[in-house]
Amino acid sequence: MVRRDSKYDERKLLFSLSDFQIREANALPIAHTYTVMCVLPINLFNQVSIVMSIYFVCLFYLSIANIYIFMVLVHHCYPIDSL
C-alpha cells in the first residue's frame, strides 16, 4: 500500500512509503502499524536510463556541431575556388 498523502511529487520519487501491520502470535488482537520506505528498482533503472539518454543526445549534438565547425574552418582555410 503506497501512501498518497506524501508532500513529494510521485514522478520524482525513487521510493515509496508502505504501511503494514504486525501482530504477534499468542497475543491480544493488537496490531502494530509500521511505515517503511521501499526503494523501487524500476524507478532506479528508469532514472539511469533517462540520464544516459540525455547524455548521449547531448554528445550527439556536440559531435554534429564539432563536425560543422571543423568543416567551416577547413573551408575558410582552404577555399575551393583557389584550387
Image: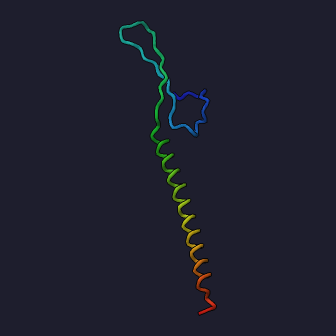
Closer to the camera in the image, 67 or 21? 67
Place of residue 39 in the rendered image (x, y in percent of width and height, measured from the top left): 46, 35
Q: Going by the picture, which residue comes out furthest to the left?
A: 26
Q: Is residue 37 above or below residue 59?
A: above
Q: Is residue 8 above or below residue 72?
A: above
Residue under the point 59% across and 93% down: 83
Place of residue 57 in the rendered image (x, y in percent of width and height, measured from the top left): 55, 59
Q: Going by the picture, which residue comes out furthest to the front?
A: 77
Closer to the camera in the image, 83 or 9? 83
Q: Going by the picture, which residue comes out furthest to the right?
A: 81
Residue under the point 56% across and 27% down: 3
Place of residue 63 in the rendered image (x, y in percent of width and height, measured from the top left): 54, 67
Q: How is the image coloured?
A: rainbow
Based on the displayed image, in which of its 4 quarters is residue 25 positioned? top left
Place of residue 59 in the rendered image (x, y in percent of width and height, measured from the top left): 53, 61
Q: Is residue 26 above or below residue 77?
A: above
Q: Going by the picture, which residue comes out furthest to the top?
A: 28
Q: Is residue 53 above or below residue 43?
A: below
Residue under the point 47% across and 22% down: 20
Based on the displayed image, in which of its 4 quarters is residue 60 positioned? bottom right
Closer to the camera in the image, 36 or 76? 76
Based on the displayed image, in which of its 4 quarters is residue 13 positioned? top right
Q: How many marks?
A: 0
